[in-house]
Every structure is written in structure tokens, then in C-alpha cells.
Amino acid sequence: MSSTTATPFVPAEIKHGSLKRERRWALIGAYIALAVFVLFFMIPPFHMLMTSLKSSAEIADLSGNPWIVSAPTLQNYWELLTEGNYLIHFRNSVIVTTCTVVISMIISVMAAFALARMKFWGSATLATGVFLTYLVPETLLFIPMFQIIGSLGLYNNMWAMVLIFPTLTVPFCTWIMIGYFASIPKELDEAALIDGAGHLQMLWKIFIPVALPGILAAMIFAFTVSWAAFIYPIAFLVSSDQMVLTVGIVSDLIRADTFQWGKIMAGALMAALPPLLVYAFLMDYYIAGLTAGATKG
Amino acid sequence: MSQGTLSVPAAPAAAPPRGGALKRLSRRNSTVAFLLTLPLILLILGLVVYPFLYALYLSMLNKRMTRFIGWENFTFLLGRETFWNVVFQSVLFAVSAVLLKALIGFVLAHVLHALPSKGQRKWRGMLLVPWVIPPAISTLAWWWLFDPSYSAFNWALMGIGVDPVPWLGQAGWARFSVILVNVWYGSPFFMIMYLAALKSVPDQLYEAAAIDGASGWQKLRYVTFPMMRNIISITVLFSLIVTFANFDIVRILTNGGPQDTTHVFATYAFQVGIQSGDIPLGASVSLFMFPLLAVFAIFTLRGVNKRSKEMA
């Protein structure tokens, strides 16, 4: 960039130095701002952890410091895992989420392949329709859904969630898969067609392997959404053995006026763990999955 | 990105003699395409379009769902003070939360972007945590932080000599609290979207601006902002939809209280429709969200279409 022939002028040197200093101050300011926000963002999880390690007596003691645990114990975790329905809720969440992810991926990969590569009558309208469906919030439809689920005899049945959750995941998964499939070079299709491959072979042998990062991102999105879903479970599931984690924790650990805060926080922390672990290990796919809608297409 | 480069391959020369075969191939193609999209179409028709039409029908029935009463549920709601409270609170909640999220997200994205790329990842990782925890779960922690007698915030405030705050007990504070939690949950999303947009602004533009003697503010105003305008509007509109239709946070923190002052459309519809058993009235409450959501959705779609044209 800079010319090497010029002799170093004194003014330039000074300017350079002040720029450097300016940048250093800007950097220090940046770190302070970041630290403040990290502190703000971490307060609830931190307090959750602290409370979950306290005994009921320590929580109830108003003279103690609520931010620090003085006698850490794993009793809350132990009780959750050995008695009560927590493990049932966890299992239900795992079953519902796994089924939702599998169903969503099958539907959306097939549809996205057709929408990205085969122009057919109404394909553009359908692609737009998919995006608009993604923008329909579940809170708009939960009341008619309540009636529909009731008439199907699935009220208070966790399998109803497997039926409904794909409406939350499929539109967006289809949308990101269209983006990924569209970015695969057409030469690959042509090579496959010349070799005599049919469309389904093309999908299976070329598109799915090539678009694997996109598929992973879409899977993570589907997992996150169905793990976190709240309004359908709270409206449709009433007995404890059918509940998923998001509603089970509250309904089981709050009896009338007694809040077992230690156990609630322990349960909440363990329920937050699967998405946190996925996030920790697959951060880039996670971010791609949850933001692709607006950056990709 | 890499499409359309090979849009006129082989076909023209070979087409006339093989017309029939091609036609057959394309007919088979559309059958395959139809079968591949069939599950998606069924899902959209059966579980989105049909419930929506059904909601319209339900909203015109009486409470016991035995009689057709036309617009009565809607006019009944419009005459209720509680309903107008819900409208006010929904708008207040959505607008202020989205503005704050956008602002915080913008600041954080800039700050992160200024860091050397080595440390960026670590900070970004920590800043995204609120967005990764399911809101129905993290709001439990906030609920406990706002507890009337054990609030850890109040304990800290007392330490510096400030009176305890009735976080969820008083209308004004309760409104503040639900917005605070929503901002806490949603800011990282804005941050990550803006960060991606910032990274896509070409460095040459800043260099050109620097040569023209632009100050930091001018660079922001005339380079960064125009380049990011589209992504900002998409993110804001999308977030308006999601925030306006929020359920989890309000339901867990206040369940609409105190005195129905924090109810938003979704929680009010839940209370009326599911808890009090007046399904038609609940359906009407939800449907009141529709016109506003439709407007936001159309503008979002326009933004996204414009963006994909720019990127193509």
C-alpha cells in the first residue's frame, strides 16, 4: 500500500502514532463495552447455576448472599434424576425432537430439491408461500389447532407434538435448503444426467452429500425450535407423563404455593444443556442454521 | 451465487428431432417434482392454511360453539377496556423491545468487528448464550431473579442503599421487566445478523472514504449504513413479527398480571380461549394480530427478494 520510496516525513510519523493510540483507546473501549454486556447476558445462567447448587435451607435463608453458594450440594440434581417425572419429561423431549427433526428433514430436503432444480407449474409461488408460512407465528394458530388436535383424539398426547412441530420447522428448513441446493453448480447435474442418473439418484448421490453443511444447519435449526417449543405443549399437554421439558419443569415443581427453586433451576439448567452443547461444538453450523433465512436468500 | 452461467446448454440444436422425448421427459419431471413437494404442500394446506380458515370460522361462533353470531366476538372485544390494554401493551412491548434489540445488536456488532479476529470468536461465543437457551427455560431464571421476597437484584440494590423494586408487582415495572427479558434474549440475534452484514461490506469502500477524508461518523453514516440498510430492515421486520406474537416470556413472568397490564395478544388469547374455555373469543383475539403481521410479512418478503436479487 504505502510507497517505499518516500523518505519518512516527520509529520506523517506523528500522525501514524496518534492513529495507533486512537486505535488502542478504541480497542480498550470495545473491551469494556463487551465486558459489560457479557456480564448482563450471563447473569441469569450464572444465578441459575448458583441456585441449583444450594440446599432448600440456604435458598430460604434471607440473610445469605443470593449470588454465591456457601455450601454447594448436588442434592437438587440427584433428586431430579432419581425421583419424580423429570426423566420422563426429558425422554419425551428427546423423542418428540428426534421425530420432528427426521420428519422435517425428509419433507424439506425433498421439496427443496424440487423447488431449486425442477421448474414446474407454480414452483415460484410455492417457494414464496413457504417463506410466508415461516413468518406465521404459532401464536396465531394455536386455538384452531387445539380444536383440530382434540377432534383427532390427540389431546394430551405427546405424539400430537410430532404432528404439529413440523409446521414450525419445515418452512424455514426448506427455505435454507433451497438456498444451499441453488448454489450447487449445474455442471454436476449435467454430469449426472449424462451418466444416466435419475432425479432421485441425483438427489441422493450428489445433492445430499454436497449440501451436507446446509443439512446440518437445517437439522440444528429444527432441533432448536422443537426443543424450545412452548405454546403448543402448554396448551395441549396436561398430564405429567406426556409433558415435555419446557412445561414439565414448572408444572411438577410448583405445588400450590411451594416453589422448589433449587430443583427448578437445576432442571432448567439440564434442559438448556443439549442446545448449549450443540452450540458449543457446532457453533458455525448453529449460527448458519438460525440466520441463513435472511443472509442466504 | 454461481447460477445462471450455463443457461443455454446443448438443447437448441438437438431439440427438433427429439421433441417428443423431451416433452415426455419434462412431463415425467413435473410428476417427480410434484411428488417430491407433495408432503410440503399437504403440511402447509393441512396444518397452516386449514387452521387459519378454521380460526376465521371459529371466531364467528358463540361461546358454546352452537350458533353462528357473525362479528359479535370482534365487536365485543373492541368494547372492552382490557382488550385495548392488550393492544397498547403489545405495541409498546414489540416496538420498544425491537428498538432496543436493534440498537444493542448494532453496537455489539460494531464493537466485535473492531476486535482483532483472534479474540472475536471467543467473545461472540459468550455473547450468543442468551439466544441459545430456550426462552421458556431462561425466563424461569429471570422469574426467580424477580421474585418478590428473594430477588437477587433487590438484594444487590439494598447493598448500595436503594429500595427494593417491585419487579413484577407493579404495572410500570412489570412492563419494564418483560421488555428487559425480551431484549436480553433477542439482542444476540441482531448482533450476529449485523456482524455478518458488516463483514460483507467491502474494505475498499472504507479506504475510498478515508481518502476522501471522511470521519468515523461519516463512514458509518454514508458507507456502513447504506450497505446494511436492507439487512437492518429485514431483521427489524422479522423481529417485529416474532416479538409482537411473543408468548413464552410474558406467560411465565407475569401471566398478564398485575391487573392484565402486561397481557399481549398471545397470552390474552391463551387465557380467554384455553384457560377460560371460550374458544371462539380466543380465536378472535389471535386473529386481531393478523392484519399487522400480514403487513410486516409482506415488507419482509419484499426486503428478502430485493436482497436475493442484489446477491444474484
Image: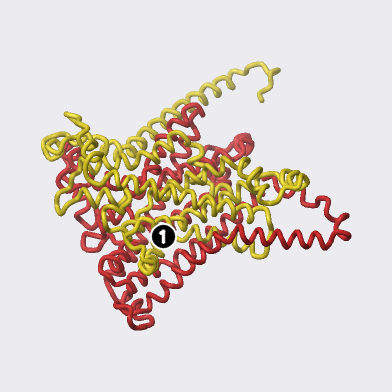
Chain colours: A yellow, B red
Residue A151 lies left or right of residue A291; in this view the side is left
| Pick the front one: B146 or A139 | A139
- Residue B107: quarter of image: top left
Q: Residue at x 72, y 43 (%)?
A: A188
- Residue A187: quarter of image: top right
Q: Is residue B247 above or below residue A150?
A: above
Q: Position of residue B29 (x, y in %)?
A: 70, 58
Q: Residue at x 38, y 64 (%)?
A: A142
> Given the image, what chain letter belongs to the residue carrying mark 1?
A
Q: Quadrant of the N terminus of chain B?
A: top right
Residue underneath mark 1: A138
Residue type marked 1:
Glu
| Pick the front one: B157 or A182 | A182
Q: Position of residue B39 (x, y in %)?
A: 55, 60
Among all residues in the image, which is located at the extreme top? A7
| Pick the front one: A164 or B146 | A164
The residue tagged with tag 1: helix, strand or loop? helix
Residue B178 in sight here: no
Q: Position of residue B114 (x, y in %)?
A: 49, 33
Q: Is residue B89 above or below residue A271?
A: below
Count the marks: how many? 1
Q: Is residue A188 above or below residue A104?
A: above
Residue B231 lies left or right of residue B98; in this view the side is right
Dot 1 alpha-carbon crowd within 10 angstroms: few under 14, some 14 to 19, many 20 or more: many
Residue B10 in sight here: yes
| Pick the front one: B170 or A18 | B170
Q: Residue at x 29, y 56 (%)?
A: B251
Q: Position of residue A216 (x, y in %)?
A: 52, 42
